[in-house]
Amino acid sequence: MVGIVIVSHSHLIAEGVAELAREMGGPDVRLETAGGLDMPDHPIGTDAVLVMEAIDRAWSEDGVLVLMDLGSAVLSAEMALDLIPEERGSKVLLCEAPIVEGAVAAAVTAKLGAPLDHVAREARGGLAGKIAHLGDAGDEEPPVPSAAPAGDGASIRVTVTAGHGLHARPAARLVQTASSFDARVTIRDLTNGRGPADAASLNAVAMLGTTQGHEIEIAAVGPGAPAALAAIRALAERNFDDRPEPEPPEAQRAAPAIPSPDGPGIVRGRPASPGIAIGPARRFRTPDLPIPEGSGPIDVEIASFEAALDHVRDEIARQRALVAGRAGADEAEIFDAHLLMLRDDALLAPTKRAIADDDISAAAAWHEVIERAAQAWDGLDDEYLRARAADLRSVGRQVLAHLLDVPVPRPSLEAPGVVIASDLSPADTVGLDPTIALGIATAAGGPTSHAAVLARSSGIPAVVGAGDALLAIAEGTTVVVDGTAGVIHVDPDESLLAELTAVRDERAVALRDAQASALEPAITIDGTTIEVAANIGSPADAVRSVAAGADGVGLFRTEFLFMGRSAMPDAREQEAAYRETAEALGGRPLLIRTLDAGADKPLPYLDQPPEPNPFLGVRGIRLGLERPELLLTQLRAILRVAADHPLRVMFPMVATVDELLAANELLEGAGERPPTLEVGVMIEVPSAAVLADRLAEHADFFSIGTNDLTQYTMAADRGNVRVSGLADAVHPAVLRSIRMTVDAANARGRWVGVCGELAGDTDATELLLGLGVSELSMGAPSIALVKRQVRTVDLAHARALADEALSCATSAEVRELLRSARIG
Ligand code: PEP
Ligand code: MG
């Protein structure tokens, strides 16, 4: 008897389907399941080894039929096939039949002793009964009031009411619905005369250019035609499952943190990186990938095309799950449209034809097909639909990059100007050249988001959280980004432009003034030397930092070194980068923070499973301990350089003493520890501040990450502008944590630095020194100004100021206190 294996992402689904199939086929059917993962925290998923084991259990010389649900279930089943001996593998059939109906039909047929191909055929036909039933019902009550005959089929007419017409999401729903019946469905747009288009092709449907108010005719031929038309009519009545634009909630409309346009010519946001930038508005463009000449044998090209499609489908499915976890299923739906593009025969078939007929490479064929399709979309009348060409090109690029075995190219600026974007990720920002990206203005984001942190380190003036009004600014319009005030001036008149230019130049002069003494040490009035160091993300930053007057590096965010690549650098490559950085510092201390990937800094190649709340998930040391091979590799590289240079190593996101002990143990195992190497802990999780006395037993120093310490203390996402009012690092609750940390450290003779953005805020310099901090680390452009500020501080006065700040109730009171201290 043929064996059957049910593969599902969910253990419960797999068991449920098996139960139903056994009920129909009888208890002695050889039926096994591979459902979900054997991980209590991540039960949903599929695992090739579990599938292989299920095939083993279901094994029969008559063969095994494997039924899968979607996405990675298929991949895991394919992988399982690779894992089993070849002679057995030839008798295992992966079947595309629907999992529930297929399992029932297969169980019944297998029980009769039918051969494997017959069982598979029955499984594939498993939907027939349902279709026949629904088709009959449709006949009794015809779903097609305005039906026009089309061959032996039928048709219906509907008016499209969805806000953006048949754009990606409604088109995707239409294609999904049409494809689920045994019928050939076509669509004509009666308003613009386009079509008929194959309803199984997202590309073809979108190409109709159907916008709101258009009448369309849907025709279907085949046994499932009535049911297909009924389902499509129901879908149209549901507005193609399009959602109306959500009204902002009351709280959001009233929230003071939401900046609003200030009249013509002014858009307000949040100051994120000080300074004034003037230039034409620019949007990112993604560079083209060079298509190499020549091609391999046709079958090899086709196989690599299929593999690239599989890889990207998997990647998009992963991103979908990630976004669904973070932002909800609705936000993730756009990825469904991307997945449909990768299954769209209107794109795949011509690519394969071109490979076979024109003797060109898969990369060249795919590029041509995507470009042709995208250009056709570009030519559509509707602006929203035109914009979907960008989706197509983006998906196309991902496949192309995989075919060419290069990283997916990142968007960049083609000419100098001010970057206007809805939001920037750290990966977008990390490579920005300040001579090209003169300023940054984003619609979303908060001032301590990692993109803002990077802008500050590069000295690029930035305003974030400026709202959607920003996105209406046309390319090339002159804009002025005032990153100190948090204002964007759009197309200012001549006199305003001259005024703002003068302010920019004045500030530049003040900065140059401060820079004149930036290379001197920062010594307070009472004679205490404060180490003023730089936060960096690359060896090149270290060179710039020394020129800016840094006494060392107080935070090397190593994860930025690992971005924009397709694999993790090995120990040798890391060692080279750390050594180059240490050499650039010429004997100044270099503090290397171990990888803080995760949350808003995912590294795609680490393949972290999606998390519902990544900022509270596996990031920093948690990832390092979960994947010790990553941390060990990094620690080995650090130890090799520490033998020759003054290094400090620091663990991020430590929340417990156990984590520190485990990290220290890995360090022990990574090689010989030079006596000069200092080992520290980042204090950025409230539990670490509270437990600082116990952590100090096992660490040489602390560095306070005020960005995360504030985010977690105030429960205010650092990337969310709507709560950025709450996330002020001088809030007394944060200041008390800093005081607690310093007291605990000093009691054991440990020093404490600050490497969060507060360290670069000259308004807070005296306060931090008064709290007992002895090292400040910041983006290089702030170093000169902070050093100048340190030289004005008297520590006795600073301590009194800190005591007063600690007794304040709100961050506004603290800011007011700091303002009057500055004036007085
Ligand atoms: C911090 O959290 O303050 C910090 C310096 O680390 P990062 O900004 O890289 O999270
Ligand atoms: Mg942090």
Image (cartoon, helix red, strand yellow):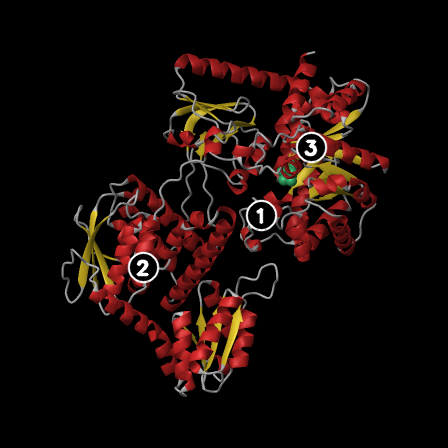
Label ID, residue 614: 1
Residue 116 image-quadrant placement:
bottom left
Give the residue at x 43% y 14%.
496
- SS at mark 3 in the image: helix
Residue 358 on image: x %, y %:
29, 61
Q: Are marks 2 and 3 in contact (CB under 8 Å)?
A: no
* Disc 2 to disc 1, C-alpha distance: 33 Å
Q: Which residue is mark 3?
A: 734
Q: Is residue 368 visible?
A: no
Give the residue at x 49% y 74%.
81
Label 3 Cα neighbours within 10 Å, binned few <14 / some 14-19 / many ≥20: many
**In front here: 718 or 487?**
718
For the residue marked with disc 3, what is the amino acid? Val
Give the residue at x 36% y 45%.
243
Label ID, residue 177: 2
The residue sitting at the right extreme is 748
Number of marks:
3
For the residue marked with disc 1, what is the amino acid? Pro
For the residue marked with disc 2, what is the amino acid? Thr
- SS at mark 1 in the image: helix
* Disc 2 to disc 3, C-alpha distance: 53 Å
Residue 563 vertical position relative to residue 748 in the rendered view, above or below: below
Residue 350 vertical position relative to residue 762 in the rendered view, above or below: below
Q: Earlier in the sequence, mark 2 or mark 1?
A: 2
Which quarter shows the C terminus? top right
Label 2 Cα neighbours within 10 Å, binned few <14 / some 14-19 / many ≥20: some
Name the quarter showing ligand 2. Answer: top right
